[in-house]
Amino acid sequence: MRPATHRAQLVGLLAEAAEIEHCLMCTYLYAAFSLKQSVDEDLQPHELEAVQRWRREIIAIATDEMLHLVLANNLAIAVGARPHYRRFNFPIAPGLFPADVAVELAPLDAATLDHFVYLERPADVAERDGARYEKTPYERHAPAGRLMQVADDYATVGELYEAIAQSCDLIAGHLGEPALFIGPRDSQLGPADFRLPGIMTIGSLAEAHEALEFIRHQGEGSRDEKAGSHYARFRAIRREWEALTRARPGFVPARAAARNPVLRDPVDPATRVQVVAEPAATLLDAGNVCYELMLRLLTALSDVVPSGPAAIARRQAICDQTLALMHTLAEVGALLSGLPANPGRHPGANAGLTFTASRTVLAFLSPETATLLLAERFGCVADRFATLAAQLPSLAGHAKTLQRFSDHWSAEHDRRWPGGAVPPAEPAAKENPMDATPAAAPAPKAPDEARGRDVLLRFDTQRCIHARMCVLGEPEVFLANTPGDWLFPDKATPERIAIVAANCPSGAITYDRLDGGPNEAAPRVNALRVRENGPLAVMAEMHLVGHENATGSTFRATLCRCGASANKPFCDGSHNAAGFKASGEPATRESQPLAVRNGPLEVTPTRNGPLEVKGNLEICSGTGRTVDRVTTTWLCRCGQSQNKPFCDGSHGRTGFVADGA
């Protein structure tokens, strides 16, 4: 494949890469959603265990594809383009991609699995495509010297990324590296936005190569089957599938989801299944609105520069809502695969999520119109889910979540433009970081729950600071960054889950023992640990005033001390994006041992001021050294004190703004 010789051609290559990653993500999710979910669907217990594992694995691979989509768009932004989340509807017509890249929606059967292996194959490996995936033979040629974006052919997706890397080198050599990377880094998605291993922003040739090589190694283009590449993972599923089929020839792991479902009248009914039966048609329509909203939110992120607390809060709200929509899509996709699509014309075929791409422009005209349109759209789909919940009860919770999002954007609009007044246009980067109105916190979200045989496990995503005690301590229980089900308490003993919970500093993980064993007890010593450049980690029998109904443990919390969190008084990781610097080793103060080291601890976030603490508390450095022993103190949460972690009144001088109890 010939590399691009100028910026416009490079942007075209990145747009095609984004479309391919986007399409693969959708097709993998569709296949995963089609898998059966109980022994009542003609599966034996050991078969169900395998099928559930495949579902998690394929969703994890689809999540990787979303990461690749983000990285491709970050590089596009870095060279001066906007992120590209548009694509054509399924099945993809010949000519849009090379002939070997056939993309359509299909349930997971042997042919589809062969096709996935084929798509992810390394360049030097011979694989046969799925038996059902017939292609129209053609070749795409990009003549040299063209100014327009002309598509060229490539044998594998890995080859496309090799051409993009060569293009960056060629154009940087011609223009100079600074002249190539002209886009704003703050408009890209990074670790502060989504906790995807490997996510990074790009602003140099070295970073561009790092991102492109990461994509190739993780999936397309990886030549090492032992490296955990997508190719290796799909092959492992295929080997296990074949073994189970040999053991029981009647083994069918997927539901009869339609191949290439559509909602409107198809131009070619021979290759598509129109979904007309209820409630599938109405659910599919609402699910596609959720998908459209997810893409619009992702697009909007490039326009919300994290320039101050209010902007950071808006950006975090968009990220949280994007992840929630992914969970909703997983629920909708699984429900659709079990509902009849069109009994009259396609008896026995079930529906499926079509991921229909909207013809409308995904970007919003202005922040004012964005808040109004998001409130309106979230409200419409929330009402539809609430109606469908009469037949499909699992949608009730999603309806409430979407209504909260609608209310959030209505409140955001009223806060920024009271009475409909629109302020003069001003670049986002000039927003006053000490806006007199506290930033609206993300709408409360109930914890994720999973009931096992012996434990009811809860995970509060709004409290999580990604200390990773869960995914490192019990990786089979906690499958992070995975749409749909991700908590599996039966994969560990109650005692092991209790250990992980006790080590979770934020209190995001809580549990109830169902086997008669002891639940979590209050710490024997109330302790606060000062984290280097980070939050205050409290372990105590805590009463957090104003947050009595906050979900999660009352024994553990990480409290913001940088002043930038959009989820005050809790830490949300904003100290990383804000570049907060504060020692985790403050000087030791002279103090006497406490007569009582535990008992109730009352923590009050004061309005626009510090944390007021009353009760027995030992303040420790990050390494465990005693800093002070107190029964009453005030702790800085504006991030400006010269006497951290203690308040020195800086919040008044700097105009710190935060809700109080």
Image: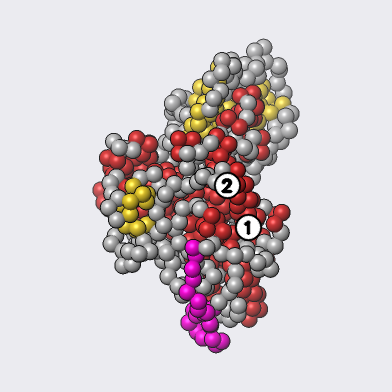
Residue at point 56%, 80% (across, down): 6
SS for dot 1: helix
Q: Earlier in the sequence, mark 1 or mark 2?
A: 1
Point out the stretch of residues depicted in magenta.
132-152
Nearest the viewer among 28 and 529 is 28
In the image, which is nearer the foreground, mark 1 or mark 2? 2
Q: Which residue is mark 1?
A: 231
Residue 456 lies in the magenta stretch: no
Q: Which residue is mark 2?
A: 245
Relative height, residue 396 to residue 424 (above, below): above
The N terminus sits in image quarter: bottom right
Residue at point 36%, 43% (across, down): 402
Q: CA distance from mark 1 to mark 2?
A: 21 Å
Is disc 2 surrounded by few (<14), some (14 to 19) or many (20+) residues within 10 Å? Answer: some
Q: Which mark is residue 250?
A: none
Nearest the viewer among 309 and 151 is 151
- Left/right placement of residue 550 relative to residue 600 reads left
Where residue 143 appears, as percent x and y from the top left, is 54, 86
Is disc 1 surrounded by few (<14), some (14 to 19) or many (20+) residues within 10 Å? Answer: many
- The three-letter code of the residue at mark 1 reads Tyr
The answer to whether residue 249 of the structure is visible from this angle is yes
Would you identify the image quadrant in which residue 160 lies? bottom right
Would you identify the image quadrant in which residue 53 lies? top right
- The three-letter code of the residue at mark 2 reads Thr
SS for dot 2: helix
Residue at point 56%, 64% (across, down): 129
Where residue 433 appears, as percent x and y from the top left, is 48, 49
Residue farthest toward the top in the current orientation of the protein: 595
